[in-house]
């Protein structure tokens, strides 16, 4: 079969080179393509000349074998083609149906009119439809940085081209992507997580194509192991620690508390009701059963405080005040202060409390008094100098006591209140006082 394809190809090239594929007035395309089981129309590039209306004879041949003949107004189709061909009598287009690979070859049309002959040739290549396309990849699990994936694309039919795609984008050769010489296989490696995805191989020929798909998963991790949760809580609270890791496939987890293995094998560690013994270091270990790698996270400290709340203040119990209790206390204090202030205002307005501002200021219950200079009384023990030069302080334990009314300025003589019985007044005052000089009015007991 390969020999026949090569033969027809060489024949077609020679036909074009020597100009024998184009008869006088009849022009065909260089070749036609067909698929096994399909159909094809062998039609002229240009219609017949006007003189062809007086056609006396025409015939179609496959190689040297006659397909059909028209002469003396009668159309005759050979038995081998009777159920597989039709003819358009106006354009002389020949339609071949139910094609097989054996239909590939040279086709010739001869036309005779009164006094003129026409001839033309073309070729037909029949292809198998591309079918049973498959994409075969590695059978083992792929590990990042270690595995190399070899992918092969197979199929049936006359394959003329192979196209590779990854995630609907062209897969191009690179240092890590190497194609075979016939482009039917590709090697990728070492593989990385970015090589995960859907690979596509499309096989084509001139009449058909078919695509196969293959998903590859590159396993990696675990890495970026983290523990989330409270670091400080109060007594009786509920604590949830959560462990996470970047891993394909998903990692499995185990926990240690203060270096001792626990029975927890999930990504979450829960303490329903904390007590002081729960304080310590919690360690989460992530494992990937495919990559066979384990990564220990940094330890997560937890402190259970007596009378203190945790980071989130949550929990049903505990020794500390909850947020609601604190808010209630604050509101209660504010209400009490407001009540006291209101009571003071009420008592003041109802005159049950008198507020005095300043010295000797009259209240609302007494009539205003005549403004008097402020008096300051001092108990002075004294003895007189022999020459009347003033008062000299002496021992406070002595029985004789004077009271002095101290006044400022050169104002008029002050009005003193009535003195008790038996008290005499002695005055000693300079005849002229400069402004601002203080003088004393001395009252002496007898």
Image (tube, grey):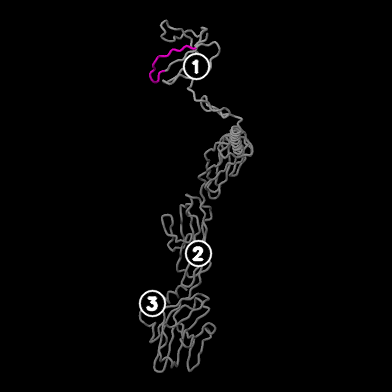
- Rendered view: 136 above or below 250: below
Q: If you read the primary sequence from the N terminus, does the residue marked by circle 3 or circle 1 appear first?
A: 3
Distance from label 3 to label 2 (Cα)?
31 Å
Residue 181 lies in quadrant: bottom left
Residue 306 in view: no
In percent of width and height, residue 98 lies at: 53, 78
Q: Which residue is mark 3?
A: 13
Judge by depth and name the residue closer to the eye, 62 or 310.
310
- Rendered view: 107 above or below 177: below
Q: Which residue is mark 2?
A: 154
Asked if residue 320 is among those painted magenta in the image, a careful observer would answer: no
Q: Counting other residues with Cα less than 10 Å from the Cα at mark 2, is it few (<14), some (14-19), or many (20 or more)?
A: some
Residue at 50%, 81% in the rendered image: 96
Distance from label 1 to label 2 (Cα)?
126 Å
Query: Which stretch appears magenta?
Result: 425-437
**Residue 377: image tag:** 1
Residue 32 lies in quadrant: bottom left
Asked if residue 432 is among those painted magenta in the image, a careful observer would answer: yes
Q: Secondary structure at mark 3?
A: helix
């Amino acid at each position: 079969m390969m020999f026949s394809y090569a033969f027809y190809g060489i024949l077609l090239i020679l036909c074009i080179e020597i100009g024998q594929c184009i008869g006088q007035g009849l022009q065909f395309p260089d070749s036609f393509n067909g698929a096994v089981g399909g159909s094809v129309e062998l039609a002229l590039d240009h219609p017949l000349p006007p003189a062809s209306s007086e056609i006396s004879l025409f015939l179609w041949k496959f190689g040297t074998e006659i397909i059909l003949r028209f002469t003396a107004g009668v159309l005759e189709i050979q038995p081998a083609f009777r159920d597989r061909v039709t003819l358009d009598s106006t354009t002389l287009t020949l339609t071949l149906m139910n094609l097989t690979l054996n239909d590939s070859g040279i086709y010739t049309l001869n036309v005779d009119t009164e006094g003129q002959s026409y001839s033309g040739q073309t070729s037909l290549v029949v292809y198998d439809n591309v079918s049973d396309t498959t994409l075969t990849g590695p059978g083992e699990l792929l590990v990042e940085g270690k595995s190399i994936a070899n992918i092969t694309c197979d199929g049936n039919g006359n394959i003329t081209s192979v196209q590779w795609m990854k995630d609907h984008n062209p897969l191009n050769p690179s240092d890590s992507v190497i194609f075979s010489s016939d482009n039917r296989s590709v090697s990728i490696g070492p593989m990385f997580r970015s090589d995960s995805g859907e690979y596509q191989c499309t096989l084509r020929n001139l009449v058909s194509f078919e695509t196969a798909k293959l998903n590859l998963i590159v396993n990696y991790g675990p890495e970026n192991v983290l523990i989330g949760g409270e670091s400080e809580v109060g007594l009786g609270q509920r604590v949830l620690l959560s462990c996470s890791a970047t891993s394909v496939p998903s990692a499995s987890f185990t926990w240690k508390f203060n270096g001792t293995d626990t029975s927890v094998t999930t990504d979450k560690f829960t303490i329903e009701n904390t007590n002081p013994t729960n304080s310590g270091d919690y360690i989460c270990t992530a494992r990937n059963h495919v990559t066979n790698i384990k990564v220990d996270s940094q330890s997560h400290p937890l402190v259970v405080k007596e009378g203190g709340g945790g980071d989130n203040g949550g929990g049903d119990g505990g020794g500390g005040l909850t947020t609601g209790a604190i808010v209630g206390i604050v509101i209660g204090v504010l209400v009490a202060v407001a009540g006291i202030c209101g009571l003071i205002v009420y008592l003041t307005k109802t005159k049950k409390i008198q507020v005095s501002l300043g010295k000797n200021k009259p209240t609302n219950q007494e009539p205003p008094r005549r403004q008097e200079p402020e008096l300051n009384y001092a108990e002075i023990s004294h003895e007189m100098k022999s020459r009347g030069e003033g008062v000299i302080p002496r021992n406070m334990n002595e029985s004789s006591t004077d009271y002095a009314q101290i006044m400022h300025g050169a104002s008029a003589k002050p009005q003193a209140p009535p003195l008790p019985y038996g008290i005499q007044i002695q005055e000693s005052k300079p005849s002229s006082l400069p402004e601002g000089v203080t003088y004393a009015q001395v009252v002496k007991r007898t």
